[in-house]
Image (cartoon, rainbow, N blue to C red):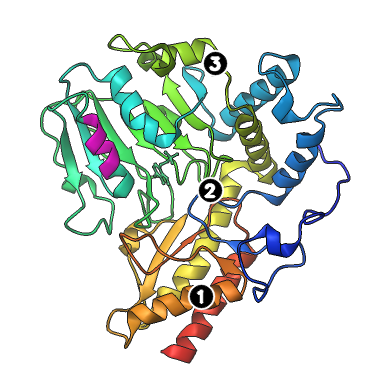
Amino acid sequence: MRRRAIPAYSSGMSTATATSASSAVKHTPSGRIFNFSAGPGALPEEVIRQAQQDIWNIDGTGIGIMEHSHRGKLFDRVLAEAEEACRKVGDVPASYKVLFLTGGATSQNFMVPANILPDDGVAAFLTTGYWAEKTWDEVKVYSSKCYEAWDGRASKHAHCPGDAELKYAARPVYVHMCSNNTIYGTQWRTADGGVRYPKMPEACDTLVCDASSDIFSRPIDVSRFGIIYAGAQKNVGIAGTTLAIVRDDLLKPVRTLPTMLRYDVQARDQSRHNTPPAFAIYLSGLVFKWILKQGGLPEIHKRNLEKASLIYAVLEGSKFWKGHARADSRSLMNLTFRVAPDVKNAQQLDEQFVKEALKNGMDQLKGHRSTGGMRASIYNAFPRDGCVALAQFMRDFEKKNG
Ligand SMILES: Cc1ncc(COP(=O)(O)O)c(C=O)c1O
Protein backbone atom coordinates (compact mmCIF):
# COMPACT_ATOMS: atom_id res chain seq x y z
CA MET A 1 0.00 0.00 0.00
CA ARG A 2 1.33 3.44 -0.85
CA ARG A 3 2.06 5.58 2.20
CA ARG A 4 2.95 9.24 2.16
CA ALA A 5 3.61 11.61 4.98
CA ILE A 6 0.25 12.98 6.05
CA PRO A 7 -0.93 14.88 9.08
CA ALA A 8 -1.81 13.03 12.28
CA TYR A 9 -5.13 11.28 12.04
CA SER A 10 -6.85 13.56 14.50
CA SER A 11 -5.56 16.73 12.85
CA GLY A 12 -8.24 19.32 12.32
CA MET A 13 -10.73 17.29 14.32
CA SER A 14 -11.14 17.80 18.03
CA THR A 15 -11.62 14.67 20.10
CA ALA A 16 -15.06 15.98 20.98
CA THR A 17 -16.16 15.93 17.33
CA ALA A 18 -14.29 12.73 16.55
CA THR A 19 -16.66 10.66 18.70
CA SER A 20 -20.03 11.07 20.29
CA ALA A 21 -18.47 10.39 23.67
CA SER A 22 -18.23 13.04 26.35
CA SER A 23 -14.98 14.69 27.33
CA ALA A 24 -14.81 12.40 30.38
CA VAL A 25 -14.01 9.52 28.03
CA LYS A 26 -10.41 8.29 28.01
CA HIS A 27 -8.89 8.63 24.55
CA THR A 28 -5.77 7.07 23.11
CA PRO A 29 -3.02 9.49 22.04
CA SER A 30 -4.42 9.49 18.46
CA GLY A 31 -7.75 10.80 19.76
CA ARG A 32 -9.50 7.52 18.98
CA ILE A 33 -11.22 5.13 21.37
CA PHE A 34 -11.86 1.39 21.10
CA ASN A 35 -14.86 0.91 18.82
CA PHE A 36 -16.62 -2.39 19.48
CA SER A 37 -19.35 -1.59 16.95
CA ALA A 38 -21.05 -4.53 15.21
CA GLY A 39 -21.12 -2.58 11.98
CA PRO A 40 -20.02 -0.33 10.52
CA GLY A 41 -16.97 -1.63 12.29
CA ALA A 42 -13.44 -0.45 12.96
CA LEU A 43 -11.19 0.05 9.93
CA PRO A 44 -7.43 -0.51 9.82
CA GLU A 45 -5.69 2.70 10.82
CA GLU A 46 -3.39 2.70 7.80
CA VAL A 47 -6.36 2.31 5.48
CA ILE A 48 -8.00 5.40 6.99
CA ARG A 49 -4.76 7.33 6.66
CA GLN A 50 -4.35 6.37 3.01
CA ALA A 51 -7.99 7.25 2.29
CA GLN A 52 -7.54 10.65 3.96
CA GLN A 53 -4.84 11.39 1.44
CA ASP A 54 -6.62 9.97 -1.60
CA ILE A 55 -9.87 11.79 -0.89
CA TRP A 56 -7.93 14.96 -1.59
CA ASN A 57 -5.75 13.88 -4.49
CA ILE A 58 -5.22 10.32 -5.64
CA ASP A 59 -2.08 9.25 -7.48
CA GLY A 60 -1.11 12.85 -8.11
CA THR A 61 -4.04 13.32 -10.50
CA GLY A 62 -5.11 16.47 -8.69
CA ILE A 63 -8.55 14.90 -8.22
CA GLY A 64 -9.85 13.02 -5.19
CA ILE A 65 -11.01 9.41 -5.43
CA MET A 66 -14.64 10.40 -4.88
CA GLU A 67 -14.56 12.83 -7.80
CA HIS A 68 -13.07 10.59 -10.50
CA SER A 69 -15.20 9.23 -13.33
CA HIS A 70 -16.14 5.61 -12.78
CA ARG A 71 -15.27 5.01 -16.45
CA GLY A 72 -11.88 6.72 -16.31
CA LYS A 73 -8.40 5.14 -16.23
CA LEU A 74 -7.89 5.88 -12.55
CA PHE A 75 -10.99 3.99 -11.51
CA ASP A 76 -10.20 1.20 -14.00
CA ARG A 77 -7.04 0.66 -11.98
CA VAL A 78 -8.76 0.95 -8.58
CA LEU A 79 -11.44 -1.56 -9.55
CA ALA A 80 -9.02 -4.02 -11.14
CA GLU A 81 -6.75 -3.89 -8.09
CA ALA A 82 -9.65 -4.33 -5.68
CA GLU A 83 -10.79 -7.43 -7.55
CA GLU A 84 -7.29 -8.83 -7.87
CA ALA A 85 -6.55 -8.34 -4.17
CA CYS A 86 -9.90 -9.89 -3.24
CA ARG A 87 -9.12 -12.94 -5.36
CA LYS A 88 -5.72 -13.27 -3.71
CA VAL A 89 -7.09 -12.92 -0.18
CA GLY A 90 -9.83 -15.52 -0.68
CA ASP A 91 -7.91 -17.66 -3.19
CA VAL A 92 -11.02 -17.27 -5.34
CA PRO A 93 -11.10 -19.81 -8.21
CA ALA A 94 -11.25 -18.49 -11.79
CA SER A 95 -14.71 -20.04 -12.17
CA TYR A 96 -16.18 -17.43 -9.79
CA LYS A 97 -16.96 -13.78 -10.44
CA VAL A 98 -16.16 -11.13 -7.87
CA LEU A 99 -18.92 -8.50 -7.86
CA PHE A 100 -19.23 -5.23 -5.99
CA LEU A 101 -22.96 -4.67 -5.71
CA THR A 102 -25.22 -2.20 -3.90
CA GLY A 103 -28.24 -2.54 -1.61
CA GLY A 104 -26.41 -4.19 1.27
CA ALA A 105 -26.45 -7.84 2.26
CA THR A 106 -30.19 -7.42 2.78
CA SER A 107 -30.71 -7.05 -0.97
CA GLN A 108 -29.15 -10.48 -1.50
CA ASN A 109 -32.19 -11.85 0.34
CA PHE A 110 -34.14 -11.20 -2.86
CA MET A 111 -31.34 -11.17 -5.42
CA VAL A 112 -30.29 -14.75 -4.70
CA PRO A 113 -33.74 -16.33 -5.15
CA ALA A 114 -34.57 -13.94 -8.00
CA ASN A 115 -31.55 -15.24 -9.92
CA ILE A 116 -31.29 -18.90 -8.97
CA LEU A 117 -34.62 -20.16 -7.56
CA PRO A 118 -37.23 -21.08 -10.19
CA ASP A 119 -40.90 -20.20 -9.50
CA ASP A 120 -42.05 -22.32 -6.59
CA GLY A 121 -38.68 -24.03 -6.47
CA VAL A 122 -37.35 -25.52 -3.24
CA ALA A 123 -34.49 -24.05 -1.20
CA ALA A 124 -33.44 -25.09 2.31
CA PHE A 125 -32.62 -22.59 5.04
CA LEU A 126 -30.42 -22.96 8.11
CA THR A 127 -31.95 -20.39 10.42
CA THR A 128 -29.26 -19.63 12.98
CA GLY A 129 -30.03 -16.05 13.94
CA TYR A 130 -31.69 -12.72 13.31
CA TRP A 131 -30.28 -12.14 9.82
CA ALA A 132 -30.93 -15.71 8.74
CA GLU A 133 -34.54 -15.25 9.87
CA LYS A 134 -34.80 -12.21 7.56
CA THR A 135 -33.40 -14.24 4.66
CA TRP A 136 -35.96 -16.99 5.30
CA ASP A 137 -38.82 -14.46 5.46
CA GLU A 138 -37.87 -12.84 2.17
CA VAL A 139 -37.64 -15.99 0.06
CA LYS A 140 -41.40 -16.35 0.41
CA VAL A 141 -41.73 -13.63 -2.23
CA TYR A 142 -40.46 -16.20 -4.73
CA SER A 143 -41.63 -19.55 -3.46
CA SER A 144 -43.91 -21.14 -0.91
CA LYS A 145 -42.14 -24.47 -1.19
CA CYS A 146 -38.94 -23.63 0.70
CA TYR A 147 -38.27 -25.02 4.14
CA GLU A 148 -36.04 -24.60 7.18
CA ALA A 149 -33.69 -27.55 7.61
CA TRP A 150 -32.72 -25.98 10.93
CA ASP A 151 -34.61 -23.57 13.15
CA GLY A 152 -32.67 -22.26 16.15
CA ARG A 153 -35.41 -19.94 17.46
CA ALA A 154 -36.47 -22.24 20.32
CA SER A 155 -32.92 -22.43 21.66
CA LYS A 156 -32.45 -18.66 21.29
CA HIS A 157 -29.96 -19.22 18.50
CA ALA A 158 -27.29 -20.18 21.01
CA HIS A 159 -25.47 -22.55 18.66
CA CYS A 160 -24.99 -23.53 15.04
CA PRO A 161 -26.37 -27.01 14.40
CA GLY A 162 -24.29 -30.13 14.01
CA ASP A 163 -24.80 -32.18 10.86
CA ALA A 164 -27.08 -34.64 12.71
CA GLU A 165 -29.44 -31.79 13.59
CA LEU A 166 -30.08 -30.79 9.97
CA LYS A 167 -33.38 -32.04 8.64
CA TYR A 168 -33.30 -31.92 4.88
CA ALA A 169 -36.54 -32.85 3.11
CA ALA A 170 -37.33 -32.30 -0.57
CA ARG A 171 -34.16 -31.83 -2.62
CA PRO A 172 -33.33 -28.12 -2.64
CA VAL A 173 -31.88 -26.04 -5.47
CA TYR A 174 -29.67 -24.44 -2.84
CA VAL A 175 -29.02 -24.33 0.88
CA HIS A 176 -28.70 -20.95 2.60
CA MET A 177 -26.55 -20.40 5.67
CA CYS A 178 -25.23 -17.42 7.62
CA SER A 179 -21.65 -18.20 8.65
CA ASN A 180 -21.54 -15.79 11.58
CA ASN A 181 -24.55 -14.60 13.52
CA THR A 182 -23.73 -11.02 14.37
CA ILE A 183 -26.44 -10.53 16.96
CA TYR A 184 -26.35 -13.83 18.87
CA GLY A 185 -22.56 -14.16 18.65
CA THR A 186 -22.41 -17.63 17.13
CA GLN A 187 -20.36 -18.89 14.23
CA TRP A 188 -20.14 -22.05 12.14
CA ARG A 189 -16.73 -23.13 13.42
CA THR A 190 -14.52 -26.08 14.14
CA ALA A 191 -12.87 -26.51 17.54
CA ASP A 192 -9.82 -24.60 16.30
CA GLY A 193 -11.92 -21.74 14.98
CA GLY A 194 -11.80 -22.79 11.31
CA VAL A 195 -14.77 -22.70 8.94
CA ARG A 196 -17.30 -25.50 9.48
CA TYR A 197 -19.26 -26.30 6.33
CA PRO A 198 -22.71 -27.78 6.93
CA LYS A 199 -23.52 -31.20 5.56
CA MET A 200 -25.24 -30.77 2.21
CA PRO A 201 -28.27 -32.75 1.05
CA GLU A 202 -27.73 -35.34 -1.64
CA ALA A 203 -27.47 -34.03 -5.19
CA CYS A 204 -27.20 -30.37 -4.12
CA ASP A 205 -23.91 -28.55 -4.51
CA THR A 206 -25.08 -24.96 -4.13
CA LEU A 207 -24.40 -23.56 -0.71
CA VAL A 208 -25.23 -19.85 -0.42
CA CYS A 209 -23.59 -18.03 2.46
CA ASP A 210 -24.26 -14.69 4.09
CA ALA A 211 -20.76 -14.02 5.39
CA SER A 212 -21.37 -10.35 6.21
CA SER A 213 -19.83 -10.48 9.65
CA ASP A 214 -16.96 -12.92 9.22
CA ILE A 215 -15.83 -12.85 5.61
CA PHE A 216 -12.04 -13.05 5.31
CA SER A 217 -11.59 -13.48 9.05
CA ARG A 218 -10.09 -16.97 8.50
CA PRO A 219 -9.05 -19.18 5.59
CA ILE A 220 -12.02 -20.26 3.49
CA ASP A 221 -12.52 -22.72 0.65
CA VAL A 222 -14.60 -20.71 -1.81
CA SER A 223 -15.17 -23.78 -4.00
CA ARG A 224 -17.47 -25.18 -1.29
CA PHE A 225 -19.99 -22.42 -2.06
CA GLY A 226 -22.24 -21.37 -4.92
CA ILE A 227 -22.51 -17.77 -3.72
CA ILE A 228 -20.84 -15.95 -0.84
CA TYR A 229 -21.96 -12.42 -0.09
CA ALA A 230 -21.16 -9.81 2.52
CA GLY A 231 -22.11 -6.23 3.26
CA ALA A 232 -18.73 -4.51 3.26
CA GLN A 233 -19.07 -2.51 6.46
CA LYS A 234 -17.51 -5.01 8.87
CA ASN A 235 -14.50 -6.86 7.44
CA VAL A 236 -14.33 -5.56 3.89
CA GLY A 237 -14.58 -1.78 4.14
CA ILE A 238 -17.49 0.58 4.44
CA ALA A 239 -21.24 0.55 3.83
CA GLY A 240 -22.20 1.21 0.23
CA THR A 241 -20.99 -1.91 -1.48
CA THR A 242 -21.76 -5.59 -1.04
CA LEU A 243 -19.21 -8.15 -2.07
CA ALA A 244 -20.71 -11.11 -3.93
CA ILE A 245 -18.62 -14.04 -5.11
CA VAL A 246 -20.74 -15.97 -7.57
CA ARG A 247 -20.00 -19.31 -9.27
CA ASP A 248 -20.18 -18.97 -13.05
CA ASP A 249 -23.01 -21.47 -13.56
CA LEU A 250 -25.27 -19.35 -11.30
CA LEU A 251 -24.84 -16.08 -13.17
CA LYS A 252 -27.63 -16.46 -15.71
CA PRO A 253 -31.01 -15.76 -14.08
CA VAL A 254 -33.74 -18.39 -14.06
CA ARG A 255 -36.39 -15.77 -14.85
CA THR A 256 -36.79 -12.41 -16.54
CA LEU A 257 -35.40 -9.80 -14.20
CA PRO A 258 -34.85 -6.03 -14.16
CA THR A 259 -31.36 -5.39 -15.50
CA MET A 260 -29.82 -4.17 -12.25
CA LEU A 261 -30.83 -7.36 -10.43
CA ARG A 262 -29.01 -9.70 -12.81
CA TYR A 263 -25.72 -11.20 -11.68
CA ASP A 264 -24.74 -11.84 -15.31
CA VAL A 265 -25.16 -8.16 -16.21
CA GLN A 266 -23.17 -7.04 -13.16
CA ALA A 267 -20.45 -9.53 -14.09
CA ARG A 268 -20.42 -8.52 -17.77
CA ASP A 269 -20.21 -4.82 -16.86
CA GLN A 270 -17.61 -5.31 -14.11
CA SER A 271 -19.93 -4.12 -11.34
CA ARG A 272 -20.51 -0.80 -13.10
CA HIS A 273 -23.63 -1.19 -15.15
CA ASN A 274 -24.56 2.11 -13.52
CA THR A 275 -22.43 4.47 -11.42
CA PRO A 276 -20.97 2.18 -8.76
CA PRO A 277 -20.16 3.14 -5.15
CA ALA A 278 -16.65 3.99 -6.26
CA PHE A 279 -15.32 5.13 -2.90
CA ALA A 280 -16.61 2.03 -1.12
CA ILE A 281 -15.01 -0.21 -3.76
CA TYR A 282 -11.75 1.74 -3.52
CA LEU A 283 -11.78 1.29 0.25
CA SER A 284 -12.46 -2.45 -0.05
CA GLY A 285 -9.38 -2.63 -2.26
CA LEU A 286 -7.29 -0.97 0.45
CA VAL A 287 -8.64 -3.37 3.06
CA PHE A 288 -7.86 -6.43 0.89
CA LYS A 289 -4.32 -5.15 0.37
CA TRP A 290 -4.02 -4.55 4.10
CA ILE A 291 -5.04 -8.18 4.76
CA LEU A 292 -2.40 -9.41 2.31
CA LYS A 293 0.21 -7.22 3.95
CA GLN A 294 -0.58 -8.71 7.35
CA GLY A 295 0.17 -12.19 5.99
CA GLY A 296 -3.21 -13.09 4.51
CA LEU A 297 -5.99 -15.09 6.10
CA PRO A 298 -3.83 -17.55 8.09
CA GLU A 299 -2.25 -14.66 10.01
CA ILE A 300 -5.55 -12.77 10.35
CA HIS A 301 -7.16 -15.94 11.71
CA LYS A 302 -4.35 -16.45 14.23
CA ARG A 303 -4.80 -12.90 15.50
CA ASN A 304 -8.58 -13.23 15.64
CA LEU A 305 -8.32 -16.43 17.66
CA GLU A 306 -6.00 -14.82 20.14
CA LYS A 307 -8.06 -11.63 20.43
CA ALA A 308 -11.28 -13.55 21.10
CA SER A 309 -9.62 -15.92 23.56
CA LEU A 310 -8.49 -12.97 25.71
CA ILE A 311 -12.15 -12.11 26.32
CA TYR A 312 -13.63 -15.62 26.40
CA ALA A 313 -11.02 -16.49 29.05
CA VAL A 314 -12.79 -14.07 31.38
CA LEU A 315 -16.08 -15.91 30.94
CA GLU A 316 -14.47 -19.29 31.62
CA GLY A 317 -14.94 -20.28 35.21
CA SER A 318 -16.68 -17.02 36.13
CA LYS A 319 -19.96 -17.19 38.02
CA PHE A 320 -20.45 -13.48 37.47
CA TRP A 321 -20.43 -13.48 33.64
CA LYS A 322 -22.59 -15.57 31.35
CA GLY A 323 -21.94 -15.96 27.61
CA HIS A 324 -24.87 -16.30 25.22
CA ALA A 325 -23.29 -18.67 22.70
CA ARG A 326 -22.70 -22.33 23.40
CA ALA A 327 -18.95 -22.89 23.74
CA ASP A 328 -18.65 -24.89 20.49
CA SER A 329 -20.27 -22.09 18.47
CA ARG A 330 -18.61 -19.05 19.99
CA SER A 331 -17.97 -16.39 17.40
CA LEU A 332 -14.50 -14.94 16.97
CA MET A 333 -16.10 -11.75 15.65
CA ASN A 334 -19.05 -10.89 17.92
CA LEU A 335 -18.75 -11.88 21.56
CA THR A 336 -22.02 -11.82 23.49
CA PHE A 337 -22.17 -11.91 27.27
CA ARG A 338 -24.05 -10.47 30.22
CA VAL A 339 -23.95 -10.37 33.97
CA ALA A 340 -25.33 -13.78 35.01
CA PRO A 341 -29.09 -13.47 35.64
CA ASP A 342 -28.73 -14.89 39.20
CA VAL A 343 -26.40 -12.06 40.22
CA LYS A 344 -28.32 -9.39 42.16
CA ASN A 345 -29.42 -6.47 39.93
CA ALA A 346 -27.94 -8.19 36.88
CA GLN A 347 -29.72 -6.04 34.32
CA GLN A 348 -28.75 -2.81 36.06
CA LEU A 349 -25.17 -4.02 36.20
CA ASP A 350 -25.23 -4.66 32.43
CA GLU A 351 -26.25 -1.04 31.88
CA GLN A 352 -23.66 0.21 34.34
CA PHE A 353 -20.99 -1.84 32.58
CA VAL A 354 -21.74 -0.26 29.21
CA LYS A 355 -21.66 3.24 30.69
CA GLU A 356 -18.45 2.73 32.64
CA ALA A 357 -16.78 1.03 29.69
CA LEU A 358 -17.45 4.13 27.59
CA LYS A 359 -15.85 6.34 30.21
CA ASN A 360 -12.84 4.08 29.93
CA GLY A 361 -12.54 4.47 26.17
CA MET A 362 -14.58 1.45 25.03
CA ASP A 363 -17.67 2.27 22.99
CA GLN A 364 -20.56 0.34 21.38
CA LEU A 365 -20.66 -2.54 23.86
CA LYS A 366 -24.42 -2.60 24.36
CA GLY A 367 -25.95 -5.84 23.09
CA HIS A 368 -28.66 -5.93 20.43
CA ARG A 369 -32.21 -5.53 21.77
CA SER A 370 -33.05 -9.16 20.96
CA THR A 371 -30.26 -10.55 23.17
CA GLY A 372 -29.71 -7.77 25.72
CA GLY A 373 -26.49 -7.74 27.75
CA MET A 374 -23.29 -6.85 25.97
CA ARG A 375 -21.70 -7.53 22.62
CA ALA A 376 -18.07 -6.92 21.76
CA SER A 377 -17.48 -6.92 18.02
CA ILE A 378 -13.83 -7.44 17.25
CA TYR A 379 -13.52 -7.65 13.48
CA ASN A 380 -10.20 -8.04 11.66
CA ALA A 381 -9.18 -4.42 12.08
CA PHE A 382 -10.08 -4.21 15.76
CA PRO A 383 -6.81 -3.89 17.71
CA ARG A 384 -5.56 -6.53 20.17
CA ASP A 385 -4.97 -3.76 22.73
CA GLY A 386 -8.72 -3.17 22.84
CA CYS A 387 -9.33 -6.82 23.70
CA VAL A 388 -6.73 -6.69 26.45
CA ALA A 389 -8.37 -3.52 27.80
CA LEU A 390 -11.86 -5.04 27.73
CA ALA A 391 -10.76 -8.28 29.42
CA GLN A 392 -9.08 -6.31 32.22
CA PHE A 393 -12.09 -4.04 32.57
CA MET A 394 -14.39 -7.06 32.85
CA ARG A 395 -12.20 -8.57 35.58
CA ASP A 396 -12.13 -5.30 37.50
CA PHE A 397 -15.89 -4.87 37.12
CA GLU A 398 -16.50 -8.36 38.49
CA LYS A 399 -14.22 -7.69 41.46
CA LYS A 400 -16.08 -4.47 42.28
CA ASN A 401 -19.60 -5.79 41.74
CA GLY A 402 -19.43 -9.57 42.07
C1 LIG B 1 -24.93 -11.44 9.09
C2 LIG B 1 -25.58 -10.21 8.54
N1 LIG B 1 -26.34 -10.30 7.45
C3 LIG B 1 -26.93 -9.21 6.92
C4 LIG B 1 -26.81 -7.97 7.50
C5 LIG B 1 -27.49 -6.80 6.86
O1 LIG B 1 -26.53 -6.11 6.12
P1 LIG B 1 -26.86 -4.79 5.30
O2 LIG B 1 -27.12 -3.73 6.31
O3 LIG B 1 -25.61 -4.58 4.50
O4 LIG B 1 -28.04 -5.05 4.45
C6 LIG B 1 -26.01 -7.82 8.63
C7 LIG B 1 -25.86 -6.50 9.25
O5 LIG B 1 -25.41 -6.33 10.35
C8 LIG B 1 -25.39 -8.98 9.16
O6 LIG B 1 -24.64 -8.88 10.27
- Residue at left 37%, top 73%? 338
- Residue at left 81%, top 54%? 12
Looking at the image, which is closer to me, 334 or 201? Answer: 334
Residue 224 appears in the picture as rendered: no
The residue indicated by pointer 2 is 40
Label annotation for residue 274: 3
Q: Which amino acid does label 1 sit on?
A: Lys
Residue 172 appears in the picture as rendered: yes
| Label 1: which secondary element | helix
**Considering only vertical position in the picture, is 376 above or below 138?**
below
Q: Which amino acid does label 2 sit on?
A: Pro
Label annotation for residue 355: 1
Q: Give the range drawn in magenta.
A: 133-139
Q: Which of marks 1 and 2 is in front?
A: 1
Name which quarter of the figure residue 263 lies in: top left
- Residue at left 52%, top 41%? 216
Q: Is residue 390 magenta?
A: no
Classify residue 226 as left or right of residue 144: right
